[in-house]
Amino acid sequence: MTVLAHQLDRTLVIGAPPALVFRYFTDSDRWAAWWGAGSTIDARPGGRVYIRYPGNVEAVGEVIDVSPPSQIVFSYGYASGTPIPPGASRVTIRLEPHQRGTRLQLTHALTAEASVRDEHVQGWRYQLSLFANVVADDVHGDISATVDNWFAAWNEQDAAARTTAIERLASPAVQMRDRFSCVEGADELTTHIGAAHRFMPGLRITRDGTPRHCQGTVLVDWTAAGPDGQPRGRGTNVFTLGPDGRIEAVTGFWAS
């Protein structure tokens, strides 16, 4: 019996439900999205695991166990045989529900000496960081559309239409903070927007440039223009998105 004498562990929270996260271990296109072009997986016991790293470095393995949507286990080694021969290590990934999405627990057990294990600590830290971003991009889809719909809700003068838009886009407990806002909850937010229309009639907010997204946090530049189309202010919003894809909080910074 092969003794896997050394192991490394890593735990992180992914902002997505377990069923969605698990697809990235069972579908070859999604698998390649975080490992690299040409990587594949046949997600059934005995199925082939293939990873193509930059520089044509190849890792290979075999699926040992797959239990959707909570666990996958596979062997892992390098096609060249160095520093880990094929079959000489085992990767176990477990998923469990978390209030912020999914808790991912990874264990990589190896026959090789501790120094080889230690060389892989940063490798997994990096690879799972790529993974978190790929999954977040999937969860949140078209970020530009989300942001544009948010600003459209702010520009909406009809109270009923505005309420419907905010309910679709945002969490019921959504928070808004900026120079003129310190509100909590969708109901208060929609009323607050209505007051903005009353005291600043004709003001419209539009996105400037491409939103920047990282794992559920989005930076967006904007311009506020008056009824004459002339700018009245500019700034940047920081959006916090939940694991369900909805907006949980917005902090706005007005340019000085």
Image (cartoon, rainbow, N blue to C red):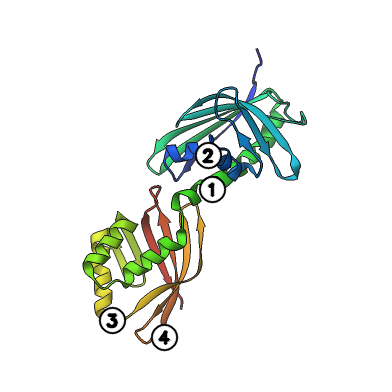
Inter-mark Cα distance, 1 to 3: 41 Å
Give the residue pinned by disc 3.
Answer: 201
Residue 189 or residue 43, whichever sits in front: 43
Give the residue pinned by disc 4.
Answer: 230
Q: Are marks 1 and 2 in contact (CB under 8 Å)?
A: yes
Residue in the picture at 45% in, 37% down? 103
Give the residue pinned by disc 1.
Answer: 134
Residue most extreme to the top:
1
Residue 9 or residue 225, whichever sits in front: 225
Location of residue 104 with respect to 247 vertically, above or below: above
Give the residue pinned by disc 2.
Answer: 24
Q: Tag 4, which secondary structure?
A: loop
Q: Earlier in the sequence, mark 4 or mark 2?
A: 2
> What x and y, as percent, mark residue 121?
64, 37
Residue 146 or residue 243, whichever sits in front: 146
Q: Tag 3, which secondary structure?
A: loop
Residue in the picture at 37% in, 64% down? 149
Q: Tag 2, which secondary structure?
A: loop
Q: Earlier in the sequence, mark 4 or mark 3?
A: 3
Inter-mark Cα distance, 2 to 3: 48 Å
Inter-mark Cα distance, 4 to 1: 39 Å
Q: Earlier in the sequence, mark 1 or mark 3?
A: 1
| Kind of residue at disc 4 | Gln
Q: Are marks 4 and 1 in contact (CB under 8 Å)?
A: no
Q: Are marks 4 and 3 in contact (CB under 8 Å)?
A: no
Location of residue 222 with respect to 59 vertically, above or below: below
Q: Which mark is residue 218?
A: none
Task: Tell me: 113 left or right of 214.
Answer: right
